[in-house]
Image (tube, rainbow, N blue to C red):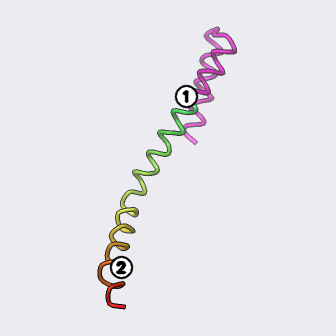
Amino acid sequence: MFELIFILVFGATLLVTGVTMVTVIAGVAFSLVVMVLLGMLSVAFKLLPWLIVIAIGIWFFKNHVAQSR
């Protein structure tokens, strides 16, 4: 939600300062790409503890549980 608000404010700021419509669209598109990439990175960091737990669980299953069968 924060990313969407930032992009809308950024686009409005570019329009108010008198920048042409083509550069406004290019600026908003570039900022959208940057925000999406940073958002995905932050979600990965937020999920990192769970990913480590899953990796340890898979390692434990492969090395200890699967060998006894």
- Tally the marks: 2
Q: Vertical placement of 68 versus 34: above or below?
A: below
Residue 32 image offset from top left, x and y in percent: 58, 32
Please give left or right for residue 15 compared with residue 2 in the image.
right
Q: CA distance from mark 2 to mark 1?
A: 43 Å
Residue 28 image offset from top left, x and y in percent: 61, 25
Image quarter in which the C terminus is found: bottom left
The three-letter amino acid code for the residue at tag 1 is Ser
Q: Residue at the spot x=46%, y=50% of the render? A: 43
Q: Nearer the viewer, residue 60 or 49?
A: 60
Please give left or right for residue 4 compared with residue 37 in the image.
right
Q: Check if mark 2's residue and mark 1's residue have beta carbons within 8 Å.
A: no
- The crowd level at tag 1 (other Cα within 10 Å; few <14, some 14-19, many 20+) is some
Residue marked by disc 1: 31
Q: Residue at the spot x=30%, y=83% of the render? A: 64
Q: Residue furthest bottom?
A: 69
Q: Residue at the spot x=60%, y=18% of the render? A: 13
Q: Of the two numbered discs 2 and 1 on the same chain, state the one appearing first in sequence.
A: 1
Q: Residue at the spot x=64%, y=18% of the render? A: 24
Residue 69's tag is none
Predominant secondary structure, magenta span? helix
Disc 1 is placed on an element classified as helix
Image quarter in which the N terminus is found: top right
Residue 61's tag is 2
- The crowd level at tag 2 (other Cα within 10 Å; few <14, some 14-19, many 20+) is few
Residue 52: say if magenta: no
On the image, which quarter does residue 59 sit in? bottom left
Extent of the magenta region: 1-30
Please give left or right for residue 8 compared with residue 35 in the image.
right
The three-letter amino acid code for the residue at tag 2 is Phe
Q: Vertical placement of 29 versus 63: above or below?
A: above
Residue 3 image offset from top left, x and y in percent: 55, 37
